[in-house]
């Protein structure tokens, strides 16, 4: 008989059992479910709702159940529907009828919300740690390439030269915002819903704050209806994860382009590439491509969760069983991508000479010629027109700006002097952008210092919050 089956006169249809069961995926919550149950039963005894000896027997039984699940010795069945009922059934099998007292003063509705919050806050710390490793790899490449110049692009057309280090630091900044979002969301995840019951609280004189303190929550979800019915903390995670993997996908796209023969800017380590079953010469950037591909999967989980929630009345509805698979899938997808990206970036070979050759064979220094004329008191719009004519002439002659003689330059504007050759060199063009956030070498070094300081702050946050979530596992 089902643990909830007292008012039913016949068994559940087998197809219903199979369709409604969630144990195939929510078994991932087993350790968190038992952590919550241990805190709950201790509170029940403290509040004299159940005898201390019963609580001790239940605690002992829960620890045995945890060990058996961890060792793969426990049978988790669809007949018991979900991880909560499976754990309770295993507990009763272990300690007898006294195990049935565990569920006093709580519902699966507040229990599942608790388990998900425990799981998510634990995983958030892992994600932030993985992100800092990706940032560290990008910083390593930036430091090693502080004098490497490559074309900067807009519209995928060469625009202005930039330091490769500057390009890497752009992604460091993107991932820093991802770290901020994920770490900030921790405080909204870290609230205990336990004690909300099915929707209205409980008649037993429980101490919700005691349970929250035992589980290292920062407090409780104040409203019982809100505690069991909302999953905004899941939506927030899925949204933050979507932004993070979007940044990974953009970097993936650049790695795919840069490693092609057409660009030949980087070479990814063999350990992070695959070959072709037909073409022996191929070296494919499959990791970057697959991360780019999995981005749509993460977006889909976000849209799925929002769609599930949008029409639900308060409080709990069975639709909300759909809140877990997308969360688990996104978490594992993002963890996997981040874990691969750090070593892939760190071991990447940067082809400095090829990058510089590309800068030398384009018109990405044209803006500096216009700025040069502006500094000679020519209005920018007129300077823009003059340089446009110079560029057109060079295209027609199949040459570049630095190939022009001084006489050629002065045929377009008498304001141009011999110093133009120094000004239009790629290194000079880069270092001319000497403003906060610019690509000049000293400004990029400033960015690195600031990024390393923020990275240390993130590592401190990880240490503090790892202790908060890991103390329960000891």
Image (cartoon, rainbow, N blue to C red):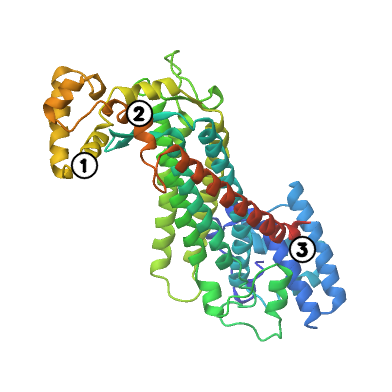
Mark 3 closeness class: few <14, some 14–19, many ≥20 residues within 10 Å: many
Q: Nearer the viewer, residue 451 or 403?
A: 403
Position above or below: 105 against 348: below
Q: Is residue 33 left or right of residue 356?
A: right
Nearest to viewer (mark 2 / mark 1): 1
Residues at badges 2 and 1 in contact (C-beta under 8 Å)?
no
Q: CA distance from mark 1 to mark 3?
A: 81 Å
Q: Residue at x 44, y 23 (%)?
A: 352
Q: Residue at x 52, y 40 (%)?
A: 337
For residue 374, the mark is: 1
Q: Is residue 152 left or right of residue 14?
A: left
Rendering quarter of residue 41:
bottom right
Q: Secondary structure at mark 3?
A: helix
Q: Secondary structure at mark 2?
A: helix
Position above or below: 166 against 181: above
Mark 2 = which residue? 426
**Outermost residue, top side:** 280
């Amino acid at each position: 008989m089902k643990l909830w089956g007292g008012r039913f006169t016949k068994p559940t249809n087998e197809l219903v059992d199979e369709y409604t069961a969630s144990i195939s995926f929510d078994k991932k919550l087993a350790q968190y479910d038992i952590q919550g149950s241990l805190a709950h039963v201790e509170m029940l005894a403290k509040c004299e709702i159940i005898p201390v000896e019963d609580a001790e027997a239940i605690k002992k039984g829960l620890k045995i159940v945890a060990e058996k699940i961890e060792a793969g010795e426990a049978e988790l069945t669809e007949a018991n529907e979900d991880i909560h009922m499976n754990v309770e059934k295993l507990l009763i099998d272990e300690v007898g009828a006294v195990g049935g007292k565990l569920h006093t003063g709580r519902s699966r509705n507040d229990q599942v919300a608790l388990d998900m919050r425990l799981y998510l806050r634990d995983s958030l710390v892992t994600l932030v740690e993985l992100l800092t490793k990706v940032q560290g790899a990008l910083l390593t490449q930036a430091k090693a390439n502080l004098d490497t110049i490559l074309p900067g692009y807009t519209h995928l057309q060469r625009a202005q030269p930039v330091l490769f280090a500057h390009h890497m630091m752009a992604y460091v900044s993107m991932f820093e915002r991802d770290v901020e979002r994920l770490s900030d969301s921790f405080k909204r995840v870290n609230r205990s819903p336990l004690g909300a019951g099915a929707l209205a609280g409980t008649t037993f004189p429980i101490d919700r704050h005691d349970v929250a303190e035992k589980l290292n929550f920062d407090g409780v979800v104040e409203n019982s209806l809100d505690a069991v019915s909302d999953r905004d903390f899941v939506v927030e995670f899925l949204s933050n994860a979507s932004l993070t993997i979007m940044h990974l996908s953009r970097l993936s796209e650049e790695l795919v382009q840069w490693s092609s023969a057409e660009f030949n800017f980087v070479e990814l380590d063999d350990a992070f590439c695959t070959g072709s079953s037909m073409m022996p010469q191929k070296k494919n950037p499959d990791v970057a491509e697959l991360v780019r591909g999995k981005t749509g999967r993460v977006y889909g989980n976000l849209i799925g969760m929002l769609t599930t929630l949008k029409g639900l009345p308060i409080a709990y509805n069975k639709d909300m069983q759909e809140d877990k698979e997308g969360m688990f899938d996104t978490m594992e997808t993002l963890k996997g991508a981040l874990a691969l990206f750090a070593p892939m970036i760190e071991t990447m070979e940067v082809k400095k000479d090829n990058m510089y050759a590309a800068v030398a064979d384009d018109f990405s220094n044209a803006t500096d010629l216009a700025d040069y004329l502006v500094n000679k008191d020519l209005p920018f719009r007129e300077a823009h027109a003059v340089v446009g004519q110079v560029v057109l002439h060079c295209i027609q002659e199949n040459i570049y700006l630095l190939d022009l003689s001084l006489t050629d330059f002065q045929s377009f504007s008498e304001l141009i002097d011999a110093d133009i050759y120094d000004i239009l060199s790629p290194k000079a063009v880069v270092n001319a952008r000497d403003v906060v956030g610019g690509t000049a070498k000293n400004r990029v070094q400033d960015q690195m210092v600031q990024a390393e300081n923020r990275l240390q702050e993130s590592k401190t946050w990880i240490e503090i919050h790892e202790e908060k979530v890991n103390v329960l596992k000891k």
